[in-house]
Image: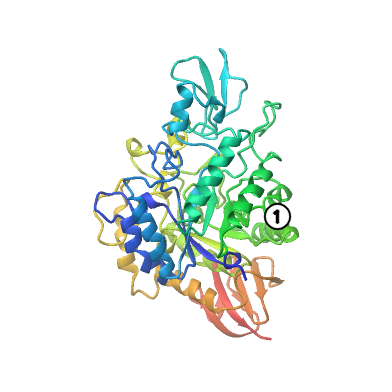
Amino acid sequence: MNWWRGAAIYQVYPRSFADGNGDGVGDLAGLRQKLPHLAELGVDAIWLSPWYPSPMADGGYDVADYRDIEPVFGTLVEAEKLIGEAHAVGLRVIIDIVPNHCSDRHPWFQEALAGRGRDRFWFHEGDEPPNDWRSRFGGPAWSRTPDGKSWYLHLYSPEQPDLNWTNPEVRAEFESILRFWLDRGIDGFRIDVADGLVKDFSRPDAETPYSDQDGVHEIYRSWRRVLDEYPDDRVFVGEMWLPDPARFALYLRQDELHSAFNFDFLCCPWDPTELRRVIDATLAAHAPVGAPPTWVLSNHDVTRHVSRMGRADTSFDFGRRQHLTPTDLELGAKRARAAIMLTTALPGCVYVYQGEELGLEEVDDLPDELREDPVWERSGHTDRGRDGCRVPIPWGDDGATWLPRPAHWGSLSVAAQTGDPDSMLAHYRNVLGLRHAERALGDGPMEWLDLGPGVVAFARGDDFACVLNLSAEPVALPEHDGVLLTSGPLADGALPPDTAAWLRRTR
């Protein structure tokens, strides 16, 4: 079986993972030191958010050089050592690639401002922008060039000019970038804004003429041909926030991307009817193209799920981020323990965002003057942005960090939780370890079990069942030959609310 079809993949946000040199910023030295933690956790691969040289106008997603490493993080030589050391402990390495836009400091854009190679980007001459497109970070998607004579397109911050993918030079450059990293042993790429590369300027008033245009698929077919030149099962995973499951599935055809993030599940409320609906829709969308689903609860762009699950509204929507909303963190952590058992038991691949194995919550009360997410400024200080999920994770022997950690995170550190059998860290290790041991888990079919309207339950293979109680009262477990794991204590043999159980099912 292809390793990626049922893998557990751990997302590293390099700036906030582990600080190896004591300057308050995560780096490759820190990540290399913590590889044993990740191997012991039980994941199969790591995915690194951008590690390229960047002015950090958007947390590294404004790339100034696609063939080098941000000096704050380390060097290209260190990156090559990291890849080899990760492979030595059984971890594959996936890196971000950012093809929709680059940094305004990228040599190409600097050349374009000087009048050379302008057709690598989208420029418009005139007193007014050509359309009323809006940036996904708020405000207009067109900004004036420094000389005031023209406009350029940026679907994100003004420091991130969009590349023109109708230009063959852009296509050739990114195929070369793919080969550069594949030659260094990278196992795959997470494609940022995978739906956004092709724009339709003939429909300026369409809802999203810069998303999910048909021409994007030929780009990924050409990328897949590059990837398939290399041995050892290299992979693509796409980031697309698309409303239409059928359109989403087109990216996962056999000659395009291997997988893509399942954001409908991430956004789903903690509700049995909605969870079953989203799971069914996800499986139905992936089935025709034979691609494995992915399941993810948190990442570097969204409110951490311990916080979401402790709120009255447990769903997620970028349009209504719930900063400073009353939150029951004890309830959120209880639900998070159950949620990881649900996601890892579902068919396909699962992603873990750094710090969720420690039960970290969203940091809502960061001082405004320390916020770096461009969403904060672009929204006119109405959206506090994504910094709250990017606070450096605690290891137990840390100094000051680029974003301040809550004082109580000391009790959630890796050091504090190590050796505590009831900790969130121990729970994640148990869950991921059992997932590896159970042959029925990972890729493959599932079968719903009807245990009542408040219960989400399903079977995997001949002898495994996952039961999640979302009702208000304890429920009886179905007939079984043994309890493999629970997210919390049973109540006289019954499964309490907001608790999950893995069972050895009676054949």
Residue at position x 65%, y 45% in the image: 242
The residue where tag 1 is placed is: 253
Quadrant in which the C terminus appears: bottom right
Examine the rendered structure and indicate whether residue 219 appears above or below residue 399.
above
Instruction: Tell me where residue 177 appears, x and y as whole percent.
Output: 50, 46
Examine the rendered structure and indicate whether residue 22 appears above or below residue 423.
above
Residue 194: image quadrant is: top right
Instruction: Tell me where residue 237 appears, x and y as whole percent.
Output: 58, 54
Residue at position x 43%, y 32% in the image: 107
Badge 1: residue crowd in 10 Å (few <14, some 14–19, many ≥20): some
Q: In the image, what residue type sits under mark 1?
A: Arg
Q: Nearer the viewer, residue 42 or 302?
A: 42
Quadrant in which the N terminus appears: bottom right
In this rendering, does residue 68 appear at all? yes
In this rendering, does residue 302 appear at all? no
Mark 1: secondary structure: loop
Residue 127: image quadrant is: top right
Return the residue found at the far right.
288
Instruction: Tell me where residue 387 appears, x and y as whole percent.
Output: 41, 44
Q: Which of 268 and 158 is in front in this view?
A: 158
Q: Nearer the viewer, residue 458 or 287?
A: 287
Q: In this view, does 236 lie to the left or right of 76?
A: right
Examine the rendered structure and indicate whether residue 429 appears above or below residue 194.
below
Instruction: Tell me where residue 225 appears, x and y as whole percent.
Output: 63, 53
Q: Which of 424 and 117 is in front in this view?
A: 117
Q: How is the image coloured?
A: rainbow
